[in-house]
Image (tube, grey):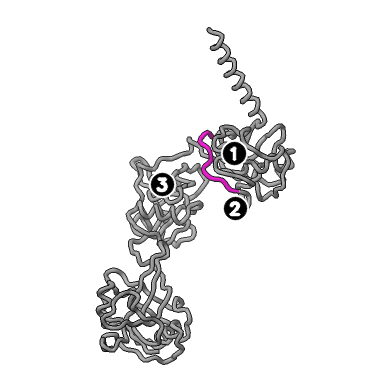
Amino acid sequence: MSAITAFLLFALVCSAYADYNRNQKFQWAELYDSEGKATSWGTVVVSASGTVGMVCDDGMRDHTADLLCQLAGFENGAESWGSHYNSAADKRLPTSIISQRGWSLYALDDISCPSYAWFLYQCSYNAVGSHDCSWGEAIVLKCRSEEEGMDIDDYSVQIQRGNGVMDFNGTVVLNGTRSDGLVCGTNVDAETAELFCNAAGYRYLVHYDVAANYSSSNKLSCDRLKDQELSVIVDDVYCPTNTTDLRDCRFRASEDGECDVDMALVVSCTNDESKHWELTNVTLAYNQVGSHDEWDLVRNNGHGTVWATIRNKRTGEEREGLVPYTWNSYTKSSICYSAGRYNRWPRSWKTGAISASSSRKVSCGYNLDNNVGYVLSYLYCSSPYYNYISLCSYEIASDSYNGSMDDALWLDC
């Protein structure tokens, strides 16, 4: 061995020993639940230079969460992190247990780890034990545990109710080649619930909750659960933001008794897009005959074709169009009120009865050039004085609604 090689080897050993020695500032980390039991999801406690205590969330970042999970023995890092303020009660370590074990309230504060850091000693932080944090600022980590992962690619998603009837609303059932099971619904959000709808062949989520909050007709019966020996097999479903495929989510196998069938996920799904639209405005509109550009439409002028605006709650898209004629006087006066015209008894006609040459309605030419149709198939107001038309009952017109344009409502307020 040459002198140069020996020197380089010595330097490498010294560097590794120095890294090891610096990292001894952090002897261990552990996650604890509200009962003080070690877990993969709970309040993080570290031992730093002999001081044992929690970590404050000041300056916290995702990379720091990964390093803390890795120090706690979870090599795959953090799935998510938060604080006592925004975490469930069973994930928060109480001060009574901290006192019983003789720990400090906080070991670390203002911890900041650069992206190149492999160890916590490469991070910056206040002097160990020095902090200005309240109990609610303690970091709660959810660490990834490889052995707890569950692959559901081989399962199909079904929605069943009653005695196993497949339907658009019911209990979410994972149907596998070897076994079937349920999904725990306690930590599922709306975006994740809709992914289960998508996997079952539906485009949209209407509603979701745990089984305990649904009537027996809208979920699997207890007898069916017993006969098929169904139980919850998946817990802690985590889907990254903007996930569009359930297979891109992560799942944890549910342990016995952790989540029972009363907490199973139940969803109501649909392919009807109208469920996501809401009525935002109703006014009166007309255009000059032969003037068919969008800016040629005159609004809020006391008379005209009733013109409604609807908005998609999911995407923010807006649509404008017609409302069918109604005989209900309350509905007509409410439309006038909504348009800023306070007339209890407005005159009304079907649009087809108004002369096109009068330029007092939205013309056929305008409707055709701008692809205008009905946006509502029904509108009913139970009071004549609704200033906010959205308080009235209405139905969004489906794509198959084929009302005649001549039957659209026209008002003179």
Position above or below: 357 against 227: below
Q: Residue at x 62, y 45 (%)?
A: 59
Q: Quadrant of residue 220?
A: bottom left
Where is residue 130? Give x, y as percent. Answer: 73, 41
> From the viewer's perspective, is the residue at label 1 or at label 2 nearer?
1
Amino acid type shown at disc 2: Asn
Q: Quadrant of the C terminus?
A: bottom left
* Residue 113 disc label: 1
Magenta region, residue range? 74-82
Q: Quadrant of residue 405?
A: bottom left
* Residue 86 disc label: 2
Q: Specify whether 259 is left or right of 52.
A: left
Where is residue 58? Give x, y as percent. Answer: 64, 47
Of residue 136 and residue 288, the one placed in the foreground of this image is: 288
N-terminal label among 3 and 2:
2
Secondary structure category for the residue under label 2: helix
Mark 3 Cα shell of 10 Å, populated few (<14), some (14-19), many (≥20): many
Give the Cα separation between the discs numbered 1 and 3: 41 Å
236 magenta-colored:
no
Amino acid type shown at disc 3: Gly
Residue designated by label 3: 181
Where is residue 283? Give x, y as percent. Answer: 40, 80
Check whether the beta carbons of the residues at disc 1 and disc 3 lie within 8 A of each other: no
